C-alpha cells in the first residue's frame, strides 16, 4: 500500500473537497428530514460554527504536518482547507443573523455591543477576511513571501478568538472547548519551537 507521501496531490485535494462539502450534505439531509432536534435553527448555528472552527484548526495543523512529512501536497491543499473554514464560519454568522436574530439589525447591533462572545466571534471572522482574500498565488506574489507569511499568522489570533467564543458560549460540559483549546495550544507551541529551531 502506498504511503501518504506518494498520494497524488489531486487525490488529497479531493479529500479536502469532500471534507469541506460533506458537513453541508449532512446538515441539509438532517434539516429536511426534521431530525435536528427541538430547535433546528439553533442546531444549524451551532453546527456551522463548530464545523468552521474544526476546519480552521485543521488548516493550522497542515503546517506541522508538512514539517513532519515534507510532503508538498499538504501545503498545496492548505489554502483550499482554509477557504472551507472561512466559508463555514461565514455561514455560522449568516445563520446566526438570519435564523437566530431574524435579520433584526438593531437587535443584532445591540448584541454585538453587549455580548462579549459575539464580539469575539465577529473579530475572528474579520481577521480571516484578509487571509481569504490574499490566499491566491497571484496576490501572494505581489505581496512578497515575507509580508504574506506575516499576514497569515493572523490565523492563530482568529483561532484563539474562535475558541474563546466557543468557551464563553458553553454552559455546562467544557470537555469539547477544552479539547479545542488544548489542540490550539499544541499547534502554537509546535510553531514556536519550530521557529526557534530554524533560527539556530
Image: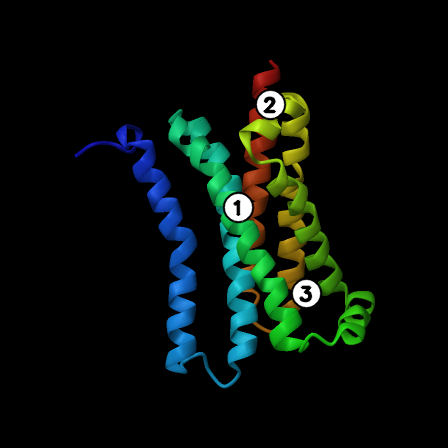
Query: Which of the 4 image quadrants contains residue 111?
Result: bottom right
Q: Which residue shows up at 54% across the image and 48% down it? A: 56
Disc 3 or 1, which lies upstream in sequence? 1
Residue farthest toward the left in the current orientation of the protein: 1
Determine the CA span between mark 3 and mark 1.
25 Å
Q: Is residue 39 left or right of residue 148?
A: left
Disc 3 or 2, which lies upstream in sequence? 2
Q: Position of residue 100 (x, y in %)?
A: 64, 76
Q: Is residue 170 visible?
A: no
Q: Position of residue 116 (x, y in %)?
A: 77, 64
Which is in the foreground here, disc 3 or disc 2? Answer: 2
Question: Where is mark 1, residue-wise?
Answer: 83
In the picture, the quarter occupied by the N terminus is top left
Above or below, comparing residue 119 to residue 84 in the picture: below
Q: How many C-alpha atoms fall within 10 Å of the one at disc 1: few (<14), some, or many (≥20)?
A: many
Residue 168, numbered circle:
3
Residue farthest toward the bottom in the current orientation of the protein: 38
Residue 141, numbered circle:
2
Determine the CA span between mark 1 and mark 2.
19 Å
Determine the CA span between mark 3 and mark 2.
39 Å
Q: Position of residue 191 (x, y in %)?
A: 57, 32
Q: Which residue shows up at 44% across the image and 30% down it? A: 66
Amino acid at each position: 500500500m502506498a504511503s501518504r507521501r506518494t498520494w497524488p496531490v489531486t487525490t488529497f485535494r479531493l479529500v479536502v473537497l469532500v471534507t469541506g462539502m460533506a458537513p453541508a450534505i449532512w446538515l441539509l439531509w438532517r434539516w429536511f428530514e426534521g431530525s435536528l432536534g427541538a430547535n433546528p435553527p439553533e442546531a444549524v448555528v451551532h453546527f456551522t460554527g463548530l464545523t468552521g472552527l474544526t476546519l480552521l484548526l485543521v488548516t493550522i495543523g497542515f503546517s506541522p504536518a508538512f514539517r513532519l512529512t515534507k510532503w508538498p501536497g499538504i501545503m498545496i491543499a492548505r489554502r483550499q482547507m482554509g477557504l472551507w473554514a472561512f466559508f463555514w464560519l461565514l455561514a455560522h454568522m449568516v445563520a446566526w443573523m438570519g435564523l437566530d436574530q431574524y435579520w433584526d439589525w438593531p437587535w443584532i447591533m445591540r448584541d454585538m455591543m453587549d455580548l462579549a462572545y459575539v464580539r469575539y466571534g465577529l473579530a475572528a471572522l474579520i481577521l480571516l477576511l484578509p487571509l481569504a482574500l490574499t490566499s491566491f498565488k497571484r496576490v501572494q506574489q505581489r505581496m512578497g513571501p515575507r509580508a504574506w507569511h506575516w499576514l497569515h499568522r493572523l490565523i492563530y489570533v482568529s483561532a484563539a478568538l474562535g475558541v474563546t467564543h466557543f468557551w464563553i458560549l458553553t454552559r455546562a460540559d467544557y470537555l469539547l472547548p477544552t479539547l479545542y483549546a488544548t489542540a490550539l495550544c499544541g499547534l502554537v507551541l509546535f510553531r514556536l519551537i519550530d521557529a526557534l529551531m530554524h533560527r539556530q
